[in-house]
Image (cartoon, coloured by chain):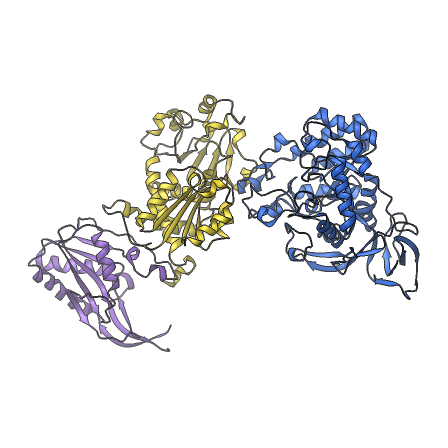
């Protein structure tokens, strides 16, 4: 099977500069990159004016299957990934049952193989049932295909247990992904602590609730030598802690979400439950620090924390609505509008934060656009504009605070294994 | 809405004469004013009731109690309005029970204001009787209500507008009959 | 004005319109027949998800005095406890043909949610820690009734500011009308960022009281001690309780106010509760008048076209 992408500009951090080339994919691999490859008899995508990136990986996604198929399924979530320009997603284990054993990991991989529009990398739970009491069978899960371990959403509060988890994960050479939150300090909080929360009469979550756990987990990583990945960094203080740790050589990496680098706590005004997320949206100063962290390499990855919730769950009193924001289908537009256009990140850096670094952290095959590498390609038109309308989402849910935002710079085609999974903003069925 | 004045029905002198006559009629009908009180309906019934009380004092040497009534909360068209009528204070600082109450208003038209005023007074107590004085009766009653004392009967069409101006509120005394320039 | 959800977004003129309309309403309360037919045929639903006798009774009396029909839905007796969502309850209310919904709810913002779902006017009768606008309006009415005006008055609000919707609404309302508002409480009960509301914030009560025209005493929820916010009620009483000595520090004609119910001996001493300058009972009476004005203004006409009269 052949696919030719004509006239695009190739962004590959391995090469110094972007260059114009036609890319020919054959049987899932990049077979040839050159100018003016003949398109006779080959299915062709015209990528004039577009950028070709190594396939994007979103290393923080909630696919909700098994257990919450009314919010999202592996099929719908991977279709949303394809529409968003992603060729791979790492799935968090807070399903029902929790992905805390090899059987659930295998189930997810089988479902993904049947219906997936993107690669799915399961993340196993650190503790059984993510209860924070006993370690889950990490080695068995790794053998079944788990790429990392996390009790995302249910932070491991017991430092002793977290230490053991890190010792064990280091032995398996698999990273621990930590959702950093001191649950006692954050208890009852529903948004960032500060003036806005005070005026709205909502209980706040202070920055320190995140930073205390970032500090603890950095210390444990330093002590154990385990690769630690800090999920969804939201505060200036966390950025500082991670920067210092990296300087000391602690094996720590970190991610930020598009909503955390785009929106402040004021998105909550009017009790907008679509802006209710954990960690909460913070302040302008935090956004500045997050952007600095992205630019200087403190933050390695952009991941969405795609967290679908049904309308009836979000359409509630703010206190009672669940935390979570959809991410997959708006991420690239936000990265280009907020980071590339504003000069925060270069195109090479985008390739690193969205493809190369997630692959490296999760121990996946290297991501590059070179002859012989996997034909996973994200094609982005940096000038295309679109007004976000949740009605266009292919996700089963629509809990996005970006409704009505105009985004510039959008994925226009997604190539997975040499096949088109999305073209012209519409997912292409892959199950035939 | 632009208005054209068709005629002046009463001027300052005419209003004064009408009120003097009404004062005499009140005294006569009630055989004195020992048990009479006046209640002016806000807004233009208020100065009229004060003037009537002055005339009565000039004639009889007795100060009759005067009160003022805001009937907004008793209107039957409140829920059909697209604006908020301002509620003024009701000032009736005497007991209406067993008194002869003379309600004073500027113009009697449909009778709905008087109906509301009677209800409002009933909520204040149980008067011996309620009588009604109006400076102008322009007809077109929608309720079985009639005035006991009338300054002037003015047959009108429904299109026409009675513009009644009182010095204490409007700076001059006059009653005009007007109609809109265009339909 | 379609709803009364907060005082934050009310203009000073709108606040004054409500206060002005409460004056004739208060007259009705002093009559033998405390009833006018104004809202005949209108239905006022009180929907209380938290226990409250004062506010609920006050709204129900206000509605009855205006001849509205009242329907009361309270949490223990309705499907609320069966897990029916607020949205579903809103549909029920809609079906019942309510003209005004008076909502008390433990979650901040709940009145906004329901106002988007019903045709009826919604009055926020207290939502979580957010606002309690009708309480603040009756407080401001009471101050204005006695002091003549609000502008320039020094108002000291003492106590659990953190959890107090009454404090938030009073801060908005009093500030909009030109009062100088001081918030005083222990550091654990002062919400972060509150100073950005244009108020003075302090934990030293005795230093703030001199010159006070109004001392507004907030109710202290006794469970705050178990939540680690207070070492003991005794310590709270000694630092922030309003007693005779503290009243002496303020202006001679200082008003002492409290939204009720009182914890005598904790936030307010028995003596002060009975002090001649304490207007706590007057607040209750005025509450009915102010709520009558609110029901009138929300049920009749459209305040935006007032000039048409």
Which quadrant is the N terminus of chain C positioned in? bottom left
Q: In what quadrant of the picture does the C terminus of chain C appear?
A: bottom left
- Rendered location of residue A92, percent (x, y): 72, 40
Residue at (65, 31) in percent of width and height? A182
Coordinates of residue A353 in the picture (x, y in percent): 79, 45
Left or right: C188, with C150 as reference point? right
In the displayed structure, A312 sits above or below C191; it is: below
Look at the image and give the colour of chain A.
blue
Question: Extreme left residue here?
Answer: B31
C100 or A64: nearer the eye?
A64
Q: Is residue C169 left or right of residue C37?
A: right
Q: Position of residue A281 (x, y in %)?
A: 64, 43
State the hue of chain B: purple
Is any part of residue C60 visible from this angle? Answer: yes
Q: How many marks?
A: 0
Residue A272 visible here: no
Relative to the observer, which residue lies in front, C262 or C8?
C262
Chain C rendering hue: yellow
Question: Could you tell me which residue is drawn at 65 percent across and 40 percent down?
Answer: A278
Q: What percent of the width, then of the height, locates residue A60?
A: 73, 42
The image quadrant that residue B25 belongs to is bottom left
Q: Judge by depth and name the residue closer to the eye, A206 or B167.
A: A206
Name which residue lies at 59% across and 39% down: A190
């Amino acid at each position: 099977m052949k696919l030719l992408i004509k006239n695009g500009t190739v962004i590959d951090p391995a090469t110094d500069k972007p260059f114009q080339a036609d890319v020919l994919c054959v049987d899932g691999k990049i077979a040839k990159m050159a100018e003016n490859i003949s398109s006779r008899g080959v299915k062709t995508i015209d990528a004039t004016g577009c950028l070709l990136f190594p396939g994007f990986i979103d290393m923080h996604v909630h696919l909700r299957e098994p257990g919450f198929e009314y919010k999202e399924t592996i099929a719908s979530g991977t279709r949303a990934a394809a529409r968003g320009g992603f060729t791979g997603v790492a799935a968090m284990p807070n399903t029902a049952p929790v992905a805390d054993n090899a059987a659930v990991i295998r189930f997810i991989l089988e479902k993904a193989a049947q219906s997936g529009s993107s690669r799915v990398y399961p993340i196993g739970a650190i503790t059984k049932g993510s209860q924070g009491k006993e370690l889950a069978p990490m080695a068995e899960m790794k053998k079944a295909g788990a790429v990392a371990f996390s009790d995302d959403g249910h932070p491991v509060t017991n430092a002793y247990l977290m230490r053991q988890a890190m010792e064990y994960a280091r032995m398996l050479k698999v990273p621990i992904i930590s959702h950093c939150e001191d649950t006692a300090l954050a208890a009852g909080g529903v948004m960032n602590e500060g003036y806005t929360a005070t005026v709205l009469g909502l209980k706040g979550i202070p920055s320190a609730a995140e930073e205390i756990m970032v500090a603890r987990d950095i210390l444990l990583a330093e002590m154990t030598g385990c690769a630690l990945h800090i999920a969804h960094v939201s505060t200036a203080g966390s950025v500082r802690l991670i920067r210092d740790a990296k300087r000391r050589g602690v094996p720590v990496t970190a991610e930020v979400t598009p909503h955390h680098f785009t929106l402040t706590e004021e998105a909550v005004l009017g009790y907008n439950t679509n802006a209710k997320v954990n960690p909460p949206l913070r302040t302008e100063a935090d956004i500045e620090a997050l952007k600095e962290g992205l630019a200087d390499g403190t933050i390695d990855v952009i991941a969405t924390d795609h967290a679908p919730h049904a309308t009836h769950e979000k359409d509630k009193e703010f206190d009672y609505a669940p935390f979570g924001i959809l991410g997959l289908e708006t991420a690239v537009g936000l990265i280009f509008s907020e980071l590339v256009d504003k000069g925060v990140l270069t195109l090479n850096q985008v390739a690193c934060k969205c493809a190369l670094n997630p692959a490296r952290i999760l121990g996946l095959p290297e991501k590059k656009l070179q002859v012989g590498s996997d034909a996973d390609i994200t094609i982005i038109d940096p000038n295309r504009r679109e007004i976000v309308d949740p009605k266009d989402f292919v996700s089963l849910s629509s809990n996005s605070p970006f409704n009505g935002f105009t985004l510039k710079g959008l994925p226009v085609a997604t190539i997975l294994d040499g096949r088109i999974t999305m073209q012209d903003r519409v997912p292409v069925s892959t199950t035939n | 809405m632009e208005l054209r004045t068709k005629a002046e029905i009463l001027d300052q002198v005419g209003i004064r004469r009408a009120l003097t006559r009404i004062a005499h009629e009140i005294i006569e009908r009630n055989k004195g004013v020992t048990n009479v009180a006046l209640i002016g309906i806000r807004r233009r019934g208020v100065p009229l009731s004060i003037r009537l009380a002055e005339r009565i004092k000039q004639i009889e040497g007795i100060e009759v109690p005067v009160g003022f009534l805001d009937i907004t909360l008793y209107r039957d068209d409140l829920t059909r309005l697209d604006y908020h009528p301002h509620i003024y204070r009701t000032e009736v600082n005497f007991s209406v029970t067993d008194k002869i109450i003379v309600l004073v208003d500027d113009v009697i038209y449909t009778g709905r204001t008087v109906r509301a005023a009677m209800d409002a007074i009933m909520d204040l107590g149980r008067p011996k009787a309620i009588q009604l004085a109006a400076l102008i009766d322009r007809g077109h009653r929608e309720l079985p209500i009639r005035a006991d004392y009338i300054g002037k009967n003015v047959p009108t069409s429904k299109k026409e507008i009675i513009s009644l101006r009182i010095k204490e509120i409007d700076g001059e005394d006059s009653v005009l009959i007007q109609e809109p320039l265009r339909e | 004005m379609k709803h009364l959800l907060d005082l934050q977004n009310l203009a000073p003129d709108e606040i004054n319109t409500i206060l002005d309309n409460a004056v004739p309403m208060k007259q009705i309360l002093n009559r033998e027949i405390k009833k006018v037919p104004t809202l005949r045929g209108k239905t006022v639903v009180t929907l209380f998800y938290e226990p409250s006798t004062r506010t609920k009774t006050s709204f129900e009396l206000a509605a009855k005095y205006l001849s509205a029909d009242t329907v009361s839905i309270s949490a223990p007796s309705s499907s609320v406890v069966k897990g029916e969502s607020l949205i579903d309850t809103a549909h029920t209310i809609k079906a019942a043909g309510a003209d005004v919904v008076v909502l008390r709810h433990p979650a901040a913002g709940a009145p906004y949610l329901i106002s988007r779902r019903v045709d009826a006017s919604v009055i926020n009768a207290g939502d979580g820690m957010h606002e309690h606008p009708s309480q603040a309006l009756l407080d401001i009415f009471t101050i204005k009734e006695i002091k003549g005006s609000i502008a320039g008055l020094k108002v000291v609000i003492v106590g659990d500011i953190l959890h107090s919707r009454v404090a938030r609404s009073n801060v908005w309302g009093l500030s909009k009308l030109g009062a100088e508002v001081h918030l005083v409480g222990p550091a654990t009960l002062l919400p972060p960022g509150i100073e950005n509301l244009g108020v003075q914030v302090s934990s030293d009560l005795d230093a703030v009281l001199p010159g006070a025209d109004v001392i507004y005493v907030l109710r202290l929820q006794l469970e705050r001690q178990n939540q680690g916010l207070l070492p003991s009620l005794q310590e709270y009483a000694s630092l922030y309780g309003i007693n005779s000595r503290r009243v002496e520090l303020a202006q001679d004609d200082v008003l002492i106010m409290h939204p009720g119910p009182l914890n005598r001996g904790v936030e307010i001493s028995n003596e002060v509760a009975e002090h001649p300058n304490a207007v706590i009972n007057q607040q209750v009476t005025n509450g009915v008048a102010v709520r009558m004005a609110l029901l009138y203004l929300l049920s009749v006409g459209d305040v935006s076209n007032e000039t048409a009269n």
